[in-house]
């Protein structure tokens, strides 16, 4: 089918030039043969052009098609006239003048003119005066030639009124066509092949008419009529090919707003046509017997030409004036834009290197100045960098609100500025983190300089509304005693700050290379973890949760993994506590939730598995207490389209025990969305069974410590107790850490419905999980009944 359609398209693409080639061969045959049948070639080509135009309109569907239907009708009249004219010649009888053929020929001209007018109106929404004036000038120039070589000789002849009228009708009709064609050409911008072929038809038609009737009028008989006949037949081919060409659908496109402008070539053409006619007429006037009428007509034409030229120059002057005004306006706008751009560049430069809240330098400007300072050899031993972090500033935001927190930050900035020297730099490098770059200090004075800032935090910060707050700070200090880079200096200060926080806050710690490897590693983890998301270093793996009876995968647990760039993977148990402490668990947890829901929606759309997979996502205590967590879950579900009923949020048992009442309220709000709640590591607490009935949960996950002790009676009894209570409360149960078939059989025998662990599958990437489910479908047979 596609092959057939391709051949049809190829045929449409080549139809126009095949038609031209075939028609050219016929015209050559016309010129070479002399038998009477040659007189039937012109009617044949005219009829073929009419048929080609109808076929082209049907194939190419121009919009609108009215102009081309008018052209087709005119060509049909030409074909009918050629049939009459050709039959006279074929029979060897003289052609009467005028005849029915002349009626048909002249009737075709109004159709052609109407088609050109319609085509011009289609392409331009409003007539352009410049185009009209140019067309009028060109037409009047041609009129002088027509008067001298066709009309005047006919008027001097002794023809009776009817033949004279018909003879004059042809050049007049040609002048009308010339005017319409000139208007179309001058208002067309992009000229398609179809438009060029249409223009060639006009040129050939008008050229053949001019040659035939000028020689007929001046000598009484046309000179070399075969040339005129061949040119007319060529015009038929051009018209047929124009309709067959695929570009017929957009014959011409309006030239956008350029008609008023006058190029050098166009101006030269207008002046030539305005002058050549009168010159030729004056040269030819010596042979004119009736000088008075001849001069009167020429004078009238010249007067009209002069008027049109004056109007054209006036329009051009008006256009130039308009352009000059627009240029002046644009120049003023450009000058204003340059001033605004200069001002904006200054503002952007300030914004790029300064903190918008406090007005202090930002991290970028601090790094630039630090690099400049470190490039000087004299900086070694006399420069120190202080990183100052506000202790428990989050509590200020949470208890008093962010506007008050912003006031505190501004007050801290002012207090820091009051304690530095002129050559020092104060910067805000983070939410509640500041930096001071101290220059030209003696080595033994750098620590004392840092301690002065701790003293400045002893007094409360006065706020609006007669309020005040106490805020302490921890300082990490780097005394630059050897050449180094800005990045290493900032990293060392950040490490010292982390140690100051770890040692109890409200103190200054000087960076030392001998700091413990564990502290450095934790500090590096905390630092790198801040950029893990933006560097795409975090990934989510999925471990299947299976139905122990059928071993069918019913859901997955989303597990985060971290692969730092250029380093070994860091286990979750190493970085999750740090993320919890630093608050990074909030954005990381939101990212895991969004990624898991997005992937879950993709799997459900692909109908992965025999049933819709549930996805369990771990939630930390800090996330659960976050007041925006409920809104974040709602937004993620809406944006990803993942059903709330397929999402399980896992909360560890210790988080629930720590503040059961608050946890129960938050869990109830989440369950109202349709989300299910699971207790992770169940059984490790001291009162698990006693509080299970008081918490609104849906799933209990039995801790793997009970699974990994084979055959221990107490563990079996506890598992049975958990299963019994869960069943009584309508809570589902999942056993974690199943690693052997014996463990799976024991849990199934005890009545546990679901499980997960390495025995079934390790945590897998999304793609690997898809392959796992494809290659390990659930068996049709169930386990034997318990």
Image (cartoon, grey):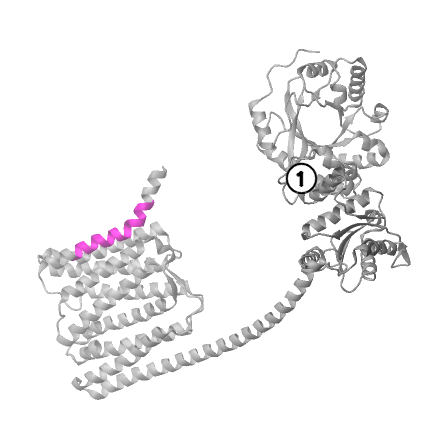
Residue at the image point whose x is 46% and y is 78% from the top: 320
| Residue 428 among those drawn in magenta | no
- Using the rendered view, name the quadrant where residue 108 is placed: bottom left
**766 on left or right of 482:** left
Residue at the image point whose x is 25% and y is 55% from the top: 49
Q: Is residue 63 visible?
A: yes
**Residue 31 position in % (x across, y down):** 13, 59
- Using the rendered view, name the quadrant where residue 748 is placed: top right
SS under mark 1: helix
Per the rendered image, the range of residues in magenta is 9-27
**Residue 252 position in % (x across, y down):** 38, 61
**Which residue lies under the disc numbered 1?**
594
Magenta span dominant secondary structure:
helix
Which quarter shows the C terminus?
top right
Task: Please tell me which residue lies in front, 613 or 763.
Answer: 763
Q: Looking at this rendering, what residue extends furthest in the bottom direction?
A: 292
Count of marks, rendered view: 1
Q: Is residue 672 visible?
A: no
């Amino acid at each position: 089918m596609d092959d057939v359609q391709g051949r049809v398209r190829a045929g449409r693409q080549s139809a126009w030039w095949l038609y031209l080639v075939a028609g050219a061969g016929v015209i050559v045959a016309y010129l070479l043969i002399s038998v009477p049948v040659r007189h039937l070639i012109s009617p044949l080509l005219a009829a073929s052009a009419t048929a080609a135009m109808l076929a082209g309109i049907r194939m190419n569907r121009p919009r609108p098609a009215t102009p081309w239907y008018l052209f087709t009708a005119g060509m049909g009249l030409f074909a009918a006239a050629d049939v009459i004219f050709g039959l006279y010649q074929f029979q060897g009888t003289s052609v009467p003048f005028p005849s029915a053929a002349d009626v048909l020929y002249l009737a075709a001209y109004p159709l052609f003119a109407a088609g050109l007018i319609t085509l011009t109106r289609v392409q331009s929404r409003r007539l352009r005066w410049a185009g009209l004036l140019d067309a009028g000038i060109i037409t009047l120039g041609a009129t002088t030639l027509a008067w001298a070589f066709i009309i005047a000789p006919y008027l001097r002849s002794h023809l009776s009124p009817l033949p004279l009228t018909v003879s004059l009708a042809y050049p007049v009709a040609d002048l009308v066509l010339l005017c319409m064609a000139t208007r179309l050409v001058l208002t067309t911008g992009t000229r398609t092949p179809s438009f060029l072929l249409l223009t060639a038809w006009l040129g050939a038609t008008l050229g053949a008419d001019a040659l035939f009737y000028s020689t007929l009028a001046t000598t009484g008989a046309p000179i070399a009529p075969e040339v005129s006949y061949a040119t007319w037949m060529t015009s038929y081919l051009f018209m047929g090919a124009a309709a067959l060409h695929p570009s017929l659908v957009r014959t011409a496109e309006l030239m956008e707003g350029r008609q008023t402008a006058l190029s050098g070539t166009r101006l030269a053409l207008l002046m030539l046509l305005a002058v050549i006619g009168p010159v030729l007429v004056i040269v030819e006037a010596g042979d004119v017997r009736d000088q008075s009428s001849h001069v009167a007509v020429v004078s009238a034409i010249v007067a009209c030409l002069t008027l049109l030229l004056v109007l054209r120059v006036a329009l051009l002057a008006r256009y130039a004036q308009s352009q000059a005004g627009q240029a002046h306006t644009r120049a003023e706008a450009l000058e204003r834009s340059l001033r605004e751009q200069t001002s904006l560049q200054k503002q952007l430069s300030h914004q790029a290197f300064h903190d918008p809240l406090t007005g202090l330098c930002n991290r970028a400007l601090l790094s630039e100045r630090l690099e400049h300072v470190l490039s000087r050899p004299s900086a070694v031993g006399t420069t120190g960098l202080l990183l100052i972090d506000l202790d428990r500033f989050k509590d200020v935001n949470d208890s008093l609100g962010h506007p008050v927190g912003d006031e505190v930050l501004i007050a801290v900035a002012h207090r820091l500025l009051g304690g530095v020297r002129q050559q020092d730099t104060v910067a805000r490098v983070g939410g509640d983190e500041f930096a001071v770059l101290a220059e030209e200090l003696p080595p033994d004075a750098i620590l004392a300089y840092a301690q002065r800032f701790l003293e400045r935090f002893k007094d409360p910060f006065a706020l609006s509304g007669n309020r005040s707050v106490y805020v302490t700070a921890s300082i990490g200090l780097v005394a630059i005693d050897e050449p180094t880079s800005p990045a290493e200096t900032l990293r060392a200060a950040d490490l010292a700050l982390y140690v100051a926080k770890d040692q109890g806050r409200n103190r200054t710690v000087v960076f030392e290379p001998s700091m413990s490897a564990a502290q450095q590693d934790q500090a590096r983890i905390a630092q790198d973890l801040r950029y893990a998301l933006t560097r795409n270093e975090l990934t989510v793996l999925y471990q299947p949760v299976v139905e122990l009876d059928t071993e069918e995968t019913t859901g997955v647990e989303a597990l985060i993994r971290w692969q730092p760039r250029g380093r070994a993977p860091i286990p979750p148990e190493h970085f999750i506590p740090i993320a919890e402490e630093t608050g990074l668990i909030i954005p990381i947890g939101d990212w895991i939730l969004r990624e898991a829901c997005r992937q879950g929606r993709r799997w459900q759309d692909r109908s992965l598995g025999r049933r819709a997979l549930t996805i369990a996502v771990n939630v930390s205590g800090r996330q659960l207490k976050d007041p925006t967590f409920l809104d974040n879950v709602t937004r993620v579900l809406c944006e990803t389209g993942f059903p709330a009923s397929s999402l399980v949020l896992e909360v560890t048992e210790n988080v629930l025990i720590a503040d059961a009442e608050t946890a129960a309220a938050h869990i109830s709000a989440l369950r109202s969305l349709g989300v299910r709640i699971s207790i992770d590591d169940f059984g490790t607490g001291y009162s698990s069974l006693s509080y299970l009935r008081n918490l609104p949960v849906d799933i209990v996950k039995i801790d793997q410590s009970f699974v990994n002790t084979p055959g221990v009676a107490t563990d079996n009894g506890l598992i049975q107790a958990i299963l019994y209570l869960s069943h009584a409360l309508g809570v589902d149960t999942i056993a974690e850490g199943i690693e052997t078939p014996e463990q799976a059989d024991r849990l199934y025998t005890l009545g546990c419905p679901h499980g997960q662990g390495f025995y079934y599958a390790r945590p897998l990437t999304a793609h690997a999980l898809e392959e796992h489910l494809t290659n390990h479908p659930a068996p049709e047979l169930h386990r034997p009944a318990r």
